[in-house]
Image (spheres, rainbow, N blue to C red):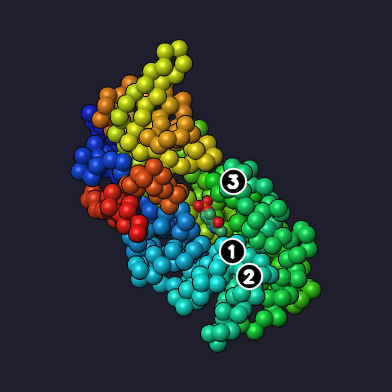
Amino acid sequence: MLCKNIGRDTQGNLTFAGQSVAALAEQYGTPLYLMDEDRIRENCRLYLSVMREAFGEGSYPLYASKAACFKRIYTVLREEGMAADFVSLGEIHTAVAAGFPMEKTCFHGNNKTDEEIAYAMDHGVGCFIVDSAWELDAVEKAAEKRGAVQDILLRLTPGIDPHTYEAIATGKVDSKFGTAIETGQAMPLVQAALGRKHVRLLGYHCHVGSQVFDEDGTVYHDAADIMLRFAKDVQRELGFTASVLNLGGGYGVRYVGSDPPVDIAANLRKLASHIRAVCQSLDFPMPQVRLEPGRSIVADAGMTLYRVGTVKQITGYKNYVSIDGGMTDNPRYALYGAKYTVLHAARTDADFRCDLVGRCCESGDVIQPDILLPKPQRGDVIAVCTTGAYNYSMASNYNRVPRPPIVMLHGGTSEIAVRRETPDDLIALDQ
Ligand SMILES: *Cc1c(COP(=O)(O)O)cnc(C)c1O
């Protein structure tokens, strides 16, 4: 199995986090997002402990909220001692509503509005990741107005292609995110930041992309090299020594059996010793390192359950299995051809080649094409694995389809964390 939380009982019935998925589908209805809370905690603990040990005191992971954002997750993160980062007022508001501590949080984005900057400052977000010179001015102004000094990192683009989907590669020179080192624009931005009275520059941030497998470790090592060399250049030219290096998120997870297994602990340890060696050779003090895992914290903690509605066999062409959800709860195949493992909840035979499709009015509403399932009956439960990241957070109400609930699984119990949307929720804002 892809992850140890997926299993079959002695009768071959599918289990998730040790619980029968058929029973959960019966109790909560479908479509249904399941979240294995124990797995989220395990993933947090791995990053927290390995980073502390490998990078030293003051280095820590921040959960990238955009992967999955709802109140309950911040309770789990708080209990685990995990920090978080945000990309919008809405994400900050969700964490605030859950009583999440703000000191170690970061605020990202290539176009934070003045309203968002004000909200983040007023709610004590610890650090702003400043994307550009324009934004530096906006943050300086907002901090000045409050008589405050805002901690910042500058987001830089190291000019690296992480070999992932184009839409989620973010560290290339021509990215809409960050300020490029290669073009010579990063140095004057540092100089500008150092000249401001109401921001305190701590160091630099970069994020090369998402779903990065980096089997030989080169992507993050190369990013660290470029960032540290830049930090050294700044020290020489401007006399400023960065104390924080944030290398963003992006470690990949296995969606299908052919994806390589990822040993995050080993990767982190290798990255730490690489950074140490580079610092030594540059004669630069080892910075505090931050990473921002999103997907690798929540993806394999998620599973989506659906029921089959119709099976269509187009003689001589192909077969479609239609389920009661679709691109509204999981747009990732439609967006960039993302792969998923699909399982029948009660049967393990698999000789019916089909496309698993949703119920939306788009031919692109595909969850996964060309898979093998047992030929299902109407009402059968189908599970799509590894849906904990970028599914709920990317869900929409297209076709006025209500979004599914999120049920948290914890130590053999289940609890609704986000309730199912109702038809009345869908018209709640209509005047
Ligand atoms: C998306 C993003 C992350 C998280 O990436 P994952 O692939 O989910 O780990 C972290 N940092 C920044 C700046 C991001 O944009």
> Disc 1 marks which residue?
111
Q: Earlier in the sequence, mark 3 or mark 1?
A: 1
Q: Is mark 2 within 8 Å of ligand 1?
A: no
Dividing the picture into quadrants, the one containing residue 230 is bottom right
Residue at image position (67%, 47%) is 161
> Disc 2 marks which residue?
135
> Disc 3 marks which residue?
167
Q: Position of residue 105 (x, y in %)?
A: 48, 69
Query: Dot 2 lies on which element?
Result: helix
Amino acid residing under circle 3: Ala
Query: Dot 3 lies on which element?
Result: helix
Q: CA distance from mark 3 to mark 2?
A: 23 Å
Total marks in image: 3
View extreme (front): residue: 431
**Does 286 sit above or below residue 266?**
below
Quadrant of the image containing the N terminus:
top left
Nearer to the camera, 8 or 272: 8
Amino acid residing under circle 1: Asn
**Does 126 sit above or below residue 37?**
below
The reply to whether the C-beta atoms of the residues labelled 1 and 2 are less than 8 Å apart is yes
Q: Earlier in the sequence, mark 3 or mark 2?
A: 2
